Amino acid sequence: MNYKLTIKIVKDAAEFNKTCAEKIKEQIAKNPQSVLGLATGGTPVGVYKELVSMHKAGAVDFGGIKTFNLDEYYPIEKGNSQSYYTYMGENLFDHVNINKANTNIPSGEAKDPQAECDAYEEKITKAGGIDYQILGIGSNGHIGFNEPDDFFPDRTHFVDLNQKTIEDNARYFDSIDDVPKKAITMGIKTIMGAKKILLMATGAGKAGIIKEALFGNITPKVPASILQLHSDVTVVLDEAAAAEIKSSISNV
Ligand code: PGA
């Protein structure tokens, strides 16, 4: 099998944010009506900041853009400071000319989470699927909240968060007991249906899982490993996250 992923290693946070934001900007320039799949977490914060600067400088127009976020905690109120609804407003949507009616995030307030999953998936399908999907990676290999399992979850679904994810995300909450134990997330098939994917990772804490995901076996125990089968994935890593794949890359 030919190795399909394009891997770019950058030297520091500034170059990381610029490189990732430039790629998103190029997508928007190429198709100003793009459907973007968006991620939350620590990794994209600087990337969104860079996009906001680009927008303020007149270089990116979000006027025709539609977005679908990967996931949301459940249950969580939109107004909770740790909801991904709040995150997206604070980090991107409140600072650019996007039409909020064109932004979509699964609702952590839905009475019937399964119905919310089905409706969310249908909305993505109706929008024509995702043109450009942005992804972080969990230290356990998750993408979105597709946690390590015995199978690859298919479409948008209701999920129990993995203990590692709860521990990783506890840093954002007053106490680990405040981290919601469930979430709604796009499925692996939803993500793999995106025409293009940008996978982003920074820091030494991701070095091991990056090696497993990009060069290990394709297995639902490492959900991100499925990306090896997608035909258009660019991976942007800082030096620390790329530390364990240097030798593999020279063989690609
Ligand atoms: P992080 O999360 O960017 O906060 O490391 C990534 C993820 O869990 O997908």
Image (cartoon, grey):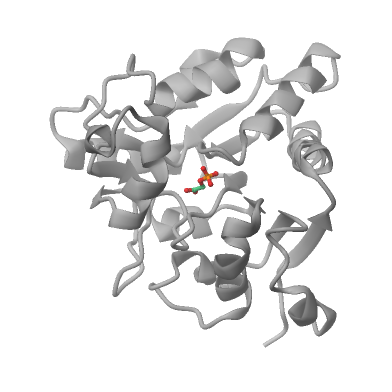
Image spot of residue 82 (x, y percent): 38, 25
Comparing 179 with 56, the one in front is 179
Task: Name the quarter where the N terminus is drawn.
Answer: bottom right
Q: Residue furthest front?
A: 175
Q: Position of residue 228 (x, y in %)?
A: 60, 72
Q: Quadrant of residue 16?
A: top right
* Residue 249, visible in the rendered structure: yes
Choose top left, top right, bottom left or bottom right for residue 122.
top left
Q: Position of residue 148 (x, y in %)?
A: 35, 66
Residue at 27% across, 20% down: 77
Q: Which residue is drawn at the image coordinates 20% and 27% (left, top)?
A: 110
In the image, is 71 to the left or to the right of 57?
Answer: left
Location of residue 41 with respect to 152 vertically, above or below: above
Residue 202 higher or lower than 151, as above or below: above
Left or right of 52, for residue 147 = left
At 18% across and 42% down in the image, what residue appears?
114
Residue 25 position (above or below residue 209) = above
Which of the pair 78/69 is nearer the observer?
78
Count of numbered labels shown in the rendering = 0
Towards the viewer: 167 or 227? 167
